[in-house]
Image (cartoon, rainbow, N blue to C red):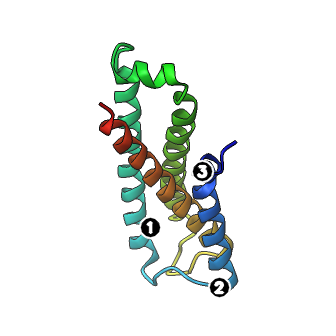
């Protein structure tokens, strides 16, 4: 496996783990208005999930005699599909985790460090996976 391909496959995972580790190590907390913060996070996660799902649907609907056929024939589809899936599932997991954060919040009690560390890990992973998909789609659009 080429070094560049390994980095492209793993950097969202590494970024999420590093961010989560730093968050936990330094004992960081979310802003005091956690409910509003999580509400905004649900919205952001849903928007990113919708974008990735729409991109996936558009690519799947392209005929085989178009750019999509060239991608399939080149074998790059085997790299593209996992990237799209990771971004889709990561953004969806971020939204669900943000939504689930509403349940333990009572009377302005802060979420546990384990919860926020998981949330940061998923958030950073899904952000980097989303950026990876967008940059890949931009490369595809540049194809002649």
Q: Earlier in the sequence, mark 1 or mark 2?
A: 2
User: Depth check: 64 or 95 in front?
Assistant: 64
Q: In terms of image quadrants, where is residue 22?
A: bottom right
**Residue occupied by mark 3:** 4
**Residue at image x 51%, y 35%?**
80
Mark in the foreground, 2 or 3: 3
Tell me if residue 72 comes above or below residue 132 in the rendering. Answer: above
**Residue occupied by mark 1:** 38
Q: Position of residue 75 (x, y in %)?
A: 55, 25
**Residue occupied by mark 2:** 27
Q: Which secondary structure, mark 3?
A: helix
Q: Relative to residue 127, is residue 10 drawn left or right?
A: right
Q: Quadrant of the N terminus?
A: top right
Q: CA distance from mark 3 to mark 1?
A: 35 Å
Q: Position of residue 78 (x, y in %)?
A: 58, 30
**Residue at image x 67%, y 78%?**
24
Q: CA distance from mark 2 to mark 3?
A: 33 Å
Mark in the foreground, 1 or 2: 2
**Residue at image x 37%, y 36%?**
140
Q: In terms of image quadrants, where is residue 52?
A: top left
Q: In terms of image quadrants, where is residue 101?
A: bottom right
How many numbered marks, from 0 up? Answer: 3
Mark in the foreground, 3 or 1: 3
User: Depth check: 124 or 144 in front?
Assistant: 144
Q: Earlier in the sequence, mark 2 or mark 3?
A: 3
């Amino acid at each position: 496996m080429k070094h560049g391909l390994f980095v492209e496959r793993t950097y969202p995972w590494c970024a999420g783990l590093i961010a989560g580790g730093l968050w936990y190590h330094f004992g960081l907390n979310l802003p005091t208005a956690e409910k509003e913060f999580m509400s905004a996070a649900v919205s952001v996660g849903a928007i990113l999930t919708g974008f990735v799902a729409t991109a996936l649907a558009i690519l799947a609907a392209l005929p085989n005699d178009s750019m999509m056929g060239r991608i399939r024939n080149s074998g790059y589809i085997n790299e593209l599909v996992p990237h799209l899936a990771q971004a889709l599932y990561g953004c969806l997991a971020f939204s669900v985790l943000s939504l689930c954060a509403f349940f333990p919040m009572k009377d302005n009690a802060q979420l546990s460090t384990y919860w926020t560390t998981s949330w940061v890990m998923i958030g950073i992973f899904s952000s980097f996976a989303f950026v990876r998909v967008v940059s890949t789609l931009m490369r595809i659009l540049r194809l002649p």
